[in-house]
Amino acid sequence: MDIDGDIFGSLMRWQVSVWIIGALAGALFLVLRAALGRFAQQMDERLGRIERVTDEIARIEGDLARLRAELPEHYIRRDDHIRDITTLSVKLDRIYELVLVREARHD
């Protein structure tokens, strides 16, 4: 009976060891699965943010292209403005001189 007890005890220890190893492997699998699920969720969130940023960049590029197209209609260069003001000043000076000459003739 002693031999049967040793075999049965040995077999039980072996089965318990297999169960423990199986339970640990299952627990490790569940932990890894949860970690990978969380990682996948974070990656999806990051990809979503990247897509939103990409869409925003495309919108800004479109706005910039439209601004570049409209800018010549609404913008005058500094040099052009200075030239126009100088031309107006010369014309006003001539008008002023004509008014002075006319007043001098009437006096």
Image (cartoon, helix red, strand yellow):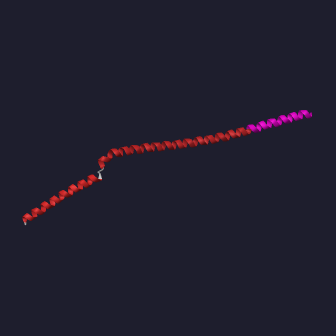
40 or 93: nearer the eye? Answer: 93
* Quadrant of the drawing holding the C terminus: bottom left
Residue at left offset 7%, top offset 64%: 106
90 or 70: nearer the eye? Answer: 90
Relative to 17, 37 lies left or right:
left
**Where is residue 48 drawn, in percent x and y?**
51, 42
On whether residue 13 falls in the magenta region, the answer is: yes
**Where is residue 52 drawn, in percent x and y?**
48, 43
* Quadrant of the drawing holding the N terminus: top right
Task: Identify the magenta region.
Answer: 1-22
89 or 8: nearer the eye? Answer: 89
Residue at the limit of the structure toward the left, as seen here: 106
Residue at left offset 79%, top offset 38%: 17
**Looking at the image, residue 36 lies above or below residue 86:** above
Residue at left offset 22%, top offset 56%: 86
Picture quadrant of residue 45: top right
Residue at left offset 69%, top offset 40%: 28
Relative to 94, 15 lies left or right:
right
**Where is residue 99 drawn, in percent x and y?**
13, 61
How many numbered discs sit on the rendered protein? 0
On whether residue 54 falls in the magenta region, the answer is: no
For the stretch drawn in magenta, the main secondary structure is helix
Relative to 52, 75 lies left or right:
left
